[in-house]
Image (spheres, rainbow, N blue to C red):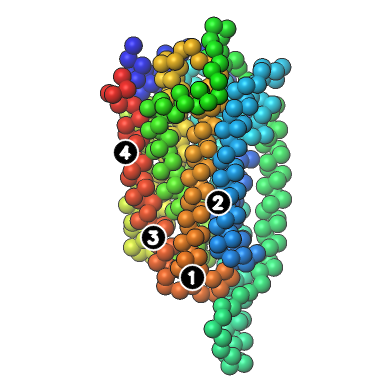
């Protein structure tokens, strides 16, 4: 059987229960469940670094350690939860539903909504569209927080400069400023996100009915956890998909994780940060349904390769002319299209890899949570590495928390973290994506 051809065309050799299709209401409720995780993730990616460095005024090395350890611990819990879910039994409300307070069971729920592979891809597109809208909403809120931060800091620094001129004081130590309004803005955004978290979680729990697993039957066995993990890791398409995903996530996280600091210190456009971020995320939101249409016409590998390629010229141009607001804003559009690609396509390709594994190992069952948990683990680990590398680099070049002005070394480091390093990582990741399903796997 040429299973790879089936995967590339979007049809599975594994029949799924409930092939009548997934109701639209179920797709929408499933997609809404993405909001809680994304609003907290967007807040951490956009403004947590600024909060810890300039509001709390912690040392960059301490911030690096806190962020890295928290991301790694978050990632380590994913395989553990995947193991517990795979060993749990079916309950009156389903197998994954009792675990929806964790992210991995929610991601795995895509395999248990019913329908065929095209329905799964459609549900993934719904989820990613809501994901981009959630990121847009969260980033608008965090953009306002960053705007308050930039305005308050600029005013405070001007007052310090005037005070120094009046008193004729000169000091070699960095001058820091209190940011009370910024603290209040962070608190307000946290309260709003908490309310959204609760409401969207309720919609997910009440609106999604979990279906029986397509790989679950009485004549199939459940191998031990370590054996299952070994089989999963040794599956060549999964290896390539994970490596491509990790490198691409690391590239995007490194670039976008330093976006606010790049705008403030390298481009001198801190006051325009929220507008630039809005353009980027609106473009990404528009691009998700567009990429879903394109992948049905030209295939997933071609779509992911083309979509990720848009990121490279965009960040090169921004790095070359960072202070040109018009150019920066225009380049945020292809960046947004590329962001939509990394959010949609790798997660759309993962169920195809799971189906391919099921064809090759028909005696195994209940391994879907392991696939998704290890995938999420690698993604979060890449995010932790990005934060750790970025903050340690800034510490090495002399970033001064709360200082009104940063040195040239900091500006250079931000440019390197924003463009050259992510480009190199992205190009390597694209090679792995291109070879997820090759002739050697047939």
For label 1, the SS is: loop
Q: Taking 291 as reference, is 388 above or below it? A: below
> Gap in Å between the C-alphas at discs 1 and 4?
35 Å
Crowdedness near tag 1: few (<14), some (14–19) or many (≥20) residues, C-alpha within 10 Å: some
Closer to the chain start, of discs 4 and 2, is 2
Q: Are marks 3 and 2 in contact (CB under 8 Å)?
A: no
Query: For residue 294, what is the image quadrant?
Result: top left
Q: Residue at x 36, y 41 (%)?
A: 429
Q: Depth check: give the residue in front, 287 or 365.
A: 365
Closer to the chain start, of discs 3 and 4, is 3
Q: Position of residue 274 (x, y in %)?
A: 53, 58
Name the residue tied to disc 1.
398
Eye-nearest disc, 1 or 4: 1
Name the residue tied to disc 3.
416
> Gap in Å between the C-alphas at discs 3 and 2?
20 Å
Residue farthest along the top direction in this orientation: 219
Q: Depth check: give the residue in front, 295 or 72.
A: 72
Q: Position of residue 64 (x, y in %)?
A: 55, 57
């Amino acid at each position: 059987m040429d299973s790879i051809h089936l995967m590339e065309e979007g049809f599975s050799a594994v029949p799924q229960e409930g092939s009548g299709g997934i109701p639209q209401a179920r797709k929408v409720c499933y997609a809404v469940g993405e909001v809680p995780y994304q609003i907290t993730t967007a807040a951490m990616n956009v403004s947590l670094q600024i909060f810890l460095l300039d509001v709390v005024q912690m040392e960059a090395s301490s911030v690096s350690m806190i962020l890295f350890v928290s991301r790694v611990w978050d990632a380590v819990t994913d395989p553990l939860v995947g193991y517990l879910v795979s060993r749990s039994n079916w309950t009156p409300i389903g197998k994954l539903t009792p675990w929806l307070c964790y992210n991995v069971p929610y991601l795995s729920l895509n395999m248990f909504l019913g329908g065929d592979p095209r329905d799964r891809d459609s549900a993934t597109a719904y989820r990613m569209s809501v994901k981009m809208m959630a990121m847009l909403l969260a980033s608008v809120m965090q953009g306002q927080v960053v705007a308050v931060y930039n305005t308050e800091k600029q005013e405070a620094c001007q007052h310090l400069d005037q005070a120094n001129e009046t008193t004729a004081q000169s000091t070699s130590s960095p001058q820091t400023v209190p940011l009370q309004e910024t603290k209040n803005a962070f608190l307000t955004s946290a309260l709003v996100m908490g309310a959204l978290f609760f409401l969207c979680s309720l919609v997910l729990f009440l609106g999604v009915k979990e279906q029986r697993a397509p790989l679950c039957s009485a004549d199939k066995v459940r191998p031990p956890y370590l054996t299952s993990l070994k089989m999963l890791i040794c599956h060549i398409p999964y290896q390539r998909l994970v490596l491509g995903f990790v490198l691409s996530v690391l590239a995007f996280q490194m670039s976008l994780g330093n976006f606010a600091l790049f705008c403030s210190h390298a481009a001198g456009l801190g006051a325009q940060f929220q507008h630039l971020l809005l353009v980027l995320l609106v473009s990404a939101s528009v691009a998700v349904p567009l990429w879903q249409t394109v992948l049905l016409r030209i295939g997933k590998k071609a779509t992911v390769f083309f979509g990720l390629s848009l990121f490279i010229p965009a960040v090169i141009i921004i790095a070359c002319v960072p202070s040109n607001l018009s150019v920066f804003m225009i380049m945020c559009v292809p960046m947004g299209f590329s962001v939509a690609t990394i959010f949609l396509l790798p997660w759309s390709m993962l169920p195809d890899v799971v189906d391919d594994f099921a064809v090759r190992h028909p005696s195994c069952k209940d391994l879907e949570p392991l696939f998704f948990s290890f995938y999420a683990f690698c993604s979060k680990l890449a995010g932790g590495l990005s934060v750790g590398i970025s903050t340690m680099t800034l510490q090495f070049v002399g970033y001064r928390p709360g200082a009104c002005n940063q040195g040239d070394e900091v500006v250079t480091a931000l440019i390197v973290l924003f463009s050259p390093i992510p480009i190199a990582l992205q190009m390597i990741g694209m090679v792995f994506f291109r070879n997820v399903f090759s002739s050697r796997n047939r």
